[in-house]
Image (cartoon, rainbow, N blue to C red):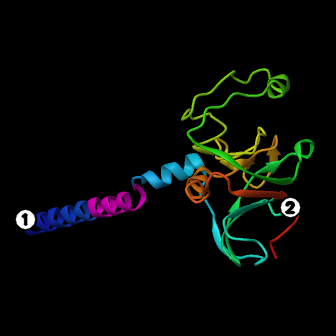
Amino acid sequence: MIRCFLHAMRSASWRATAFTLSLSATMSLTVQPASAQDFFSFLWGGGSRDEIAFNPSHSPGQVIVSFGDRKLYWVHKRGAAISYPIAVPREQSRWQGTTSVSQKRINPSWTPTPSMRRENPKLPHFLPGGHPMNPLGVRALYLGSSLYRIHGTDAPWTIGQAVSKGCIRMYNEDVLDLFPRVPVGARVTVTWRKYAG
């Protein structure tokens, strides 16, 4: 009788230990802390730049923006470029031409134009740089004397779509990569021509 009782106790103890180990293993498999990179990828959208072969007729040191491809190409050496996905202008805001980078700003502030406010009266009058709802994101490269910019975004889900009012939107992660590569004065060609094979 005592032997049966001790066997039952050992068996119950083993089952409790096995359950605890099983629960512990399950928790360690399913409850993982998020990394800072995961957090910023969620907020910013993941960058997806690629090193590609590019038309060798384009000189190194210039930016080609292809609205047709929905890509920005940084030509860093003859026959090679880094390709970044972008959001392009909506149909009524389309444009093309050749310009240059006139200035660069870290955490640019944003003031909507009068036409933007007429279209959406709920827009704020001003958003400071670094504000999480600032539509220019974390970096901006200004194009000539126009109001157009190559910039980050507070809406990463719009990358790849025709949604902007003329600017070229990039993932924040990608504009952080592009920003130090492109000097003030760099030539920027904006076209509807397609380069992707």
Mark 2 element type: loop
Seen in the picture, residue 37 relative to 25 is either above or below; the reply is above
Query: Residues in magenta?
Result: 19-32
Amino acid type, mark 2:
Gly
Say which residue appears at 69% left-offset and 77% top-offset: 78
User: Looking at the rendering, which quadrant does residue 165 occupy?
Assistant: top right
- Residue 153 image point, x, y percent: 65, 44
Seen in the picture, residue 19 relative to 56 is either above or below; the reply is above
Q: In front: mark 1 or mark 2?
A: 2
Q: Mark 1 and 2 residues: CB-CB less than 8 Å, in contact? A: no
Amino acid type, mark 1:
Ile
Q: Is residue 164 magenta?
A: no
Secondary structure mostly taken by the magenta-highlighted segment of the chain: helix
Q: Residue furthest left?
A: 2
The quadrant of the image that shows the N terminus is bottom left
Say which residue appears at 56% left-offset and 33% top-offset: 129
Q: Earlier in the sequence, mark 1 or mark 2?
A: 1
Say which residue appears at 33% left-offset and 59% top-offset: 23
- Residue 39 image point, x, y percent: 49, 49
Mark 1 element type: helix
- Give the residue pinned by disc 1: 2
Is residue 129 or residue 40 the one in the foreground? 129
Say which residue appears at 39% left-offset and 62% top-offset: 29
- Give the residue pinned by disc 2: 68
Q: Which mark, by number, is residue 52?
A: none
Q: Is residue 54 left or right of residue 131?
A: right
Q: Is residue 53 left or right of residue 39?
A: right
